[in-house]
Amino acid sequence: MAKTRPTLKDIAAALNLSHPTVSRALADHKGISPETKARVRQTAERLGYVANSSARMLRQGQSSVIGLLLPDMTNEFYAAIAQRVADDCSAQNRQLVLSISAGDSERELSLVRALLEARPSCVIAALTEKPKPETIAYLRNAYCVQIMYPHDELDGPVVTVEDSSGARIAIEHLVKLGHERIGFVGPSAEFALGEARLRGLRQAMRAAGLSVEEHYTRLGPSDAAFGYEATQALLALRCPPTAIYLSTAPLSLGGAFALNARQAKVPGDVSVVVAGGADWHAIWPGGLTSVTLPITELADTASNLAFQAGRKSRAKGHRSVCLPFELHECASTGPPAQRRG
């Protein structure tokens, strides 16, 4: 027969105290002496007592639960966001409930329903490209902090980045080094991320008086397999690019394998800019020049906005925080070969 969980009455009986005294001691009430509080806590730990957070939330009218909805945990960016938000919640004695949509709008809807059943004080959400109308309807009735690519149908805080600036600063860096034949590997422009990266490429090339050559531009799935295939194709051109920008973390991984497979000299044969701040970048001799998202600042900003749920000072309506990408220059970029010497 399963054991019943210890209750406040069990602690009270063990210490010959009243139920209200034990309850106030565990709540750190100022009317209870430090000695009594210590005895109650020690006994609670010895008995294995766990507070009923659901009951406490009902009494206080406020939840300690924060929901976090992400599309992917294999992507280093979202994995780092999840870790940082988890750390933020732990520091604030909040409970984090993590859900992964896998980019599936139907699954996303089911997860949002389940999250809201837990009565979170806030949901931090990176929604799919085309969420179900029901998903939007559910989140309208919750306090939702959107991150990365927001949906205007939701009224609430947004933490994002200047979507085209990552590609723009990567290309500007390569142009400044003297590159004109620049290869670009990016996600399909059918999606917001791909459209933003392509827009940044075009802006930077246009500003430099250069044209975007179609044969140097490879768009497709944002995965390592396409990154490998696209980089191999660029390097195999009769007149290959002198520099390549791999514009997402999965594409960067595939591109690095392709460069290694062809034994390309970097930056001797080709300069390379990658996306993200993965640890494996440092394995490359001298490191890889990268364009990174401000993960810590983005996660902390989202967490702080989430913690405002239920406060009178909470900002009403739509508040947008837009953060910049960052360029980290390493040994993988340099002037094109004809300009060295």
Image (spheres, rainbow, N blue to C red):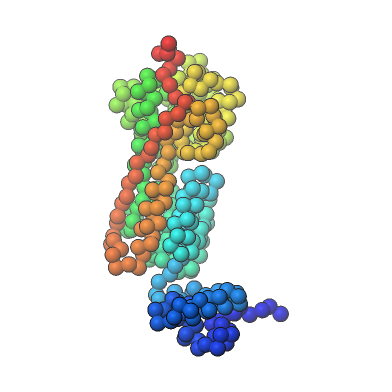
The quarter of the image holding the C terminus is: top left
Relative to 319, is 339 above or below? above
The x, y position of residue 152, in whole percent, is: 33, 53
The quarter of the image holding the N terminus is: bottom right
Residue 314, quarter of the rendered image: bottom left
Relative to 64, is 255 above or below? above
Q: Residue at x 49, y 48 (%)?
A: 80
The x, y position of residue 197, in whole percent, is: 40, 36
Relative to 247, is 109 above or below? below
Q: Residue at x 28, y 62 (%)?
A: 316
Q: Is residue 198 left or right of residue 8?
A: left
Camera-side residue: 310 or 41? Answer: 41
Residue that extends furthest to the right in the rendered view of this protein: 1
Residue 57 seen in render: yes
The x, y position of residue 167, in whole percent, is: 39, 34
Residue 9 seen in render: no
